[in-house]
Amino acid sequence: MTLSILGMGDSLPGHEITNAFLHERVGLEKGPDWVRSRFGIERRFSVLTNEYIVETKNRRPSQAIQHARGNGLTPVALGVRAAQRALDCAGVRAEQIGWVIANDDTPFETIPATAVQIAKELGVRSGPHCDVNCATSSFARHLQLLSDMKETALPDYVLAVQTGAYTVRTDYAPQSVDGYIWGDGAAAQVLSAKRPGRLRVRTVVFESDPRGADEIQIDSVGHFVQNGARVRRFSVRKTCEVFETIARALEIDLGEAWTVAHQANYVMQTSVVQHLHLPEERHLRNVHLQGNIAAAGCPSVLAQNWDRFEKGDRIAYAVVGAGLAWGGGCLEVQ
């Protein structure tokens, strides 16, 4: 079966968070120079207003959810906006979508599923809409799940959405490090195994190691927490391994392909580029401009570079995240 991506889209909320804002107004102690050298992130975007972050330091995530919801900025709203852009890019109408699958690490509602809410807002008709959540590796899981299915089991068009609002679960107390990392956003893809598309999907790997399940967590009513040093080492090592696995399995020269990874950290990505001797100009990233937006990070890079790709190009993607989980494959431009 040949699975194709017909269109992609992404979205960000409108509240910009710069390093200077975090240092001067929020009062994070590390400062812009430290975050630039450690993370390489210059700005992010949040569903929370700047004034709310300054006043509350987001001590109570449950209160932050109500604040964001009151302004109409939710993971569902971000997902709907990204999905509409993907539909427009693909030239497909919402009523043609037969299945919506979604990821949302930070749902504002326990039920119904994020996929169902997005389908409702778009006007998608009935179907097996559901959430398939593997945290920041969900883009790879969505593609592999669909690739592994029989063509006869799939509708003409599937909509995959990755969305989240991590800043709602971020602690902005003075000693916080996570405040420098997270942004909010969404990405979406229109896929089909029955209609030709611009990107041919070739999945290679998706795995998780439950022994690392406690390394990254978000409590249902609390803040994001992680074992930062261990996760950083794991992410760099595993990203390199995934790219090498893709190159061997599909006989790809990574030096001639476009490469894109999970958008966790600009400095970490530079380590991957240097370790694998990848050409910097062909490694695509946006984390320095919009922060880590979890599962939406990698596909948002692809959506933002959609018009840059040419027929015959290959795009190797590798994502790593909570679980601990990792996945990757190749997209071939048709």
Image (spheres, rainbow, N blue to C red):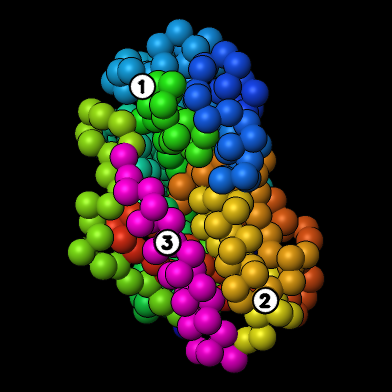
The reply to whether the magenta stretch includes residue 237 is yes
Q: Give SS at disc 3.
A: helix
Relative height, residue 159 to residue 289 (above, below): below
Look at mark 1 in the image and give the residue it sits on: 65
Residue 122 locus on image (x, y percent): 49, 38
Camera-side residue of 196 and 172: 172
Residue 9 shows up from this direction:
no
Residue 45 locus on image (x, y percent): 58, 31
Please give the name of the residue rendered at 58% of the width and 67% of the height, measured from the top-left corner.
Answer: 272
Q: Earlier in the sequence, mark 1 or mark 2?
A: 1
Q: Say what amino acid the circle numbered 1 marks.
A: Ile
Q: How busy is the neighbourhood of tag 1: few (under 14 within 10 Å), some, or many (20 plus)?
A: many
- Tell me if 40 is positioned left or right of 306 in this view: left
Q: Which image quadrant is residue 42 in?
A: top right
- From which residue to which does the magenta span run? 225-251
Calculate the distance from the C-alpha at mark 1 to the C-alpha at mark 3: 32 Å
Look at mark 3 in the image and give the residue it sits on: 233
